[in-house]
Amino acid sequence: MSTAKARTAHARAILGPELHDQLSSTRVLLVGAGGIGCELLKNIVLTGFGEITLLDLDTIDLSNLNRQFLFKKKDVKQSKALVAAQTASGFNPNVRIIPIHDNIKEPQYDIQWFQKFDIVLNALDNLDARRHVNKMCMAARVPLVESGTAGYLGQVQPLLMDRTECFDCIPKATPKTFPVCTIRSTPSQPIHCIVWSKSYLMGQLFGEDEDAVGELDEAEKQGENAQEIATLRNEAQAFKAVRNALRSSSSSDAAKMVFQKVFNADIKNLLVMEDMWRSRAPPTPLDFDTIMNDTVIPQQNGTATHNGTDAVASGSRRRSSRLAKSSASAKPSSPAKTPGSAKSSASAKPSASKKPLASKKPSPSKKPPVPTTNGEVKGAPALKDQRELTLKDNLELFVSSTNRLAARLKRGEDTISFDKDDDDTLDFVTASSNLRSTAYGIGTKTRWEVKEMAGNIIPAIATTNAIVSGLIVLQALHLLRKTYDKMRNVHLQFKPAVPLSSITLSPPNPACGICRDTYALLLCDPSRAVLGDVIKGLLGDDKREVSVYEDKRVLSDPDWDDNNERTLESLNVTRGKFLTIVDEEGDRATISVGLGVLPPNHPADAPSFILPSPLPNPPKQVKPTPPPPETPPRNSAKRPLPVEDENGVIDLEPTPMKTKPTANATSKKRKAEETQSPSKKRRLEEDGLVLMDGLEDGLEDDDCIVID
Ligand SMILES: Nc1ncnc2c1ncn2[C@@H]1O[C@H](COP(=O)(O)OP(=O)(O)OP(=O)(O)O)[C@@H](O)[C@H]1O
Ligand SMILES: [Zn+2]
């Protein structure tokens, strides 16, 4: 058998010649060339897909190499799409892979662009991009296979407009947010300090020059303590001086200045508000020189107290006595003897209830290392990153990382934000969150733990990606064959006896704001097309009252037509965006009009837009009936036990539906959202004030997979 025949013999035998031949001309878009993307690209090339467009916005990172096997060390910093395409092209000489190094959300990837593909495969890692691709596929009516992995868990879901649920039919678990005051003034857990450091402090020092008052305005509106908000406002204003110091070439003491501001002055300001500390332990301001000179003693719970009355504000003195009382009943652990601790205890003369701060001292909650017979220290961390840091270690790390980041600013970097793979930012977040934790009497974390928590890291497991990628191909084949009844929503679960479960697909959720819209394509020149004309044209003879939106922005409604004479471009409604036309009475479904470009041969003096033909004709909406009882939890004990089929695959019931508000209510809700600044909401979602629920929560849930 020739090499070419041998290469395809198995795939051809399994798929049958008809489907196998079809694959060679099937145009597939693969979005994402990361963990799943690399596996999937290999699979589709070897299955026989012949025309693959591979798109990814990222470059290769060293940390990708353990599982993204299409990349080698020499490829680090190169485009993922380009390198993956190059490597995978070698697996089959008949494949044509078109790599695109770009963000899928760019406007040129509009409805017309998506319509070029027979199928889209998602291998993404974030909700925002997934939702975007879902909407584009619904609008373009292109089948999509959505997928995700989280540790040992995975999910694959085939999606097809009008036939199955779309990605947005079922609301996704909302990320957990922390109240701004918990982050900014009353943290009680290490994660609060980590979020403060990566999302607030880093932004204030190294990010864009914005005064972080928006959040405070919002917090005040929501009834937070006005005096506390006023103090936080002053604190934000005072960042200007340290920001300048970090950027001025003469300031060698900038790190100390930052330290004194955030860990001393700001904390002292908060302590003035005695009311705040009546029911909670007040923080202790830290003093730079005292820590550097090793004259700091920790409280029983790990809180640092300065040995010297002037360094401690009155609030923390009250707390010290309270803590000393409670520690009297606790069994004291013997401090580790190190040169550092000997020095500090000698100079600090701590009282009996206080221990000197020992360098390399394990945190009170952790057992000290135990030497084993072969001389190894059992429980001692093998890696530098897993070492407990003392207060002085943290201060030194804070100074060095602040200096490194300041040097980068001086070398011309405009802004620096947290990136778990950027050592300077990780060091800074580790040190500053630990310093804050110490000031607030919270346990500290190792660099390793901070990386995991700040980076929202769930370990990526190559085998999970490989299994999920195989399942994606199977579901894609069902879509291409149009064997829709065989399609399944498949879950990879942490049950060794039954690793896979499959759910029969649900029809679209009638309340879905994405796949129940009536989509249309408007080819236009936004610099000439005028909003009022476009809407009139799209509605034709239909004279009903409508409101018009772009995303969450209201552009017009029945009582407000100020924008009707304006061009779409002046309203920032351009290629790739959608005009949403909502029926005021809620009688008709919403029309979503995607903007595309006029054909190249469209004469310059011809009309500025080409209407879709036929015009969109949204179906009548069924008025909602009263909402059914709440959907029971997926892992409810009352649910009948699933039964395995002959392949060991479990068939679960389709996901229950949720009801939707009327279009009128939707419209009102959108208007309400509009008034509360959508960009602010988005910013909150994008920055670290928004975190996913604890990893364990996601991983223990049997049927529900957290895809991100
Ligand atoms: N909007 C987008 N446009 C194009 N590609 C995207 C977009 N959002 C995410 N991606 C890509 O999706 C891929 C997801 O892969 P994966 O989950 O393995 O992430 P990773 O960044 O490679 O790994 P890690 O996050 O663990 O470092 C990444 O390569 C990422 O660049
Ligand atoms: Zn939907």
Image (tube, rainbow, N blue to C red):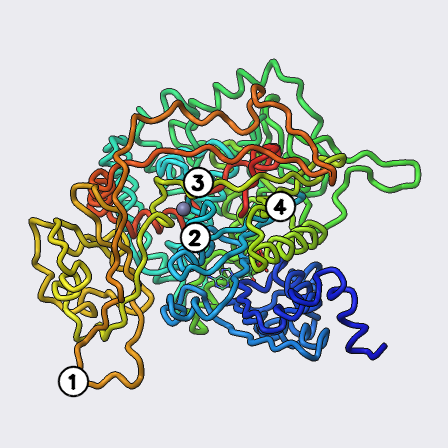
Tell me which numbered mark, 4 or 1, is placed earlier along the sequence: 4
Residues under numbered marks 4 and 1 in contact, where contact means CB atoms less than 8 Å apart: no
Q: Horizontal placement of 641 versus 303: left or right?
A: right
Q: Which mark is residue 161?
A: 2
Q: Which residue is mark 3?
A: 170
Q: Which residue is mark 1?
A: 605
Q: CA distance from mark 1 to mark 3?
A: 46 Å
Residues under numbered marks 3 and 2 in contact, where contact means CB atoms less than 8 Å apart: no
Residues under numbered marks 2 and 1 in contact, where contact means CB atoms less than 8 Å apart: no
Q: CA distance from mark 4 to mark 1?
A: 54 Å
Residue kind at label 2, given as amino acid type: Met
Q: Nearer the viewer, mark 4 or mark 3?
A: 3
Q: Which residue is mark 4?
A: 154
* Residue at (71% x, 75% y) in the render: 92
Q: CA distance from mark 4 to mark 2?
A: 23 Å
- Residue 355 drawn at (x, y percent): 62, 29
Tell me which numbered mark, 1 or 3, is placed earlier along the sequence: 3
Q: Is mark 2 within 8 Å of ligand 2?
A: no
User: In the current view of this chain or complex, which residue is farthest to the top?
Assistant: 329
Q: Secondary structure at mark 4?
A: strand
User: In the current view of this chain or complex, which residue is farthest to the right?
Assistant: 374
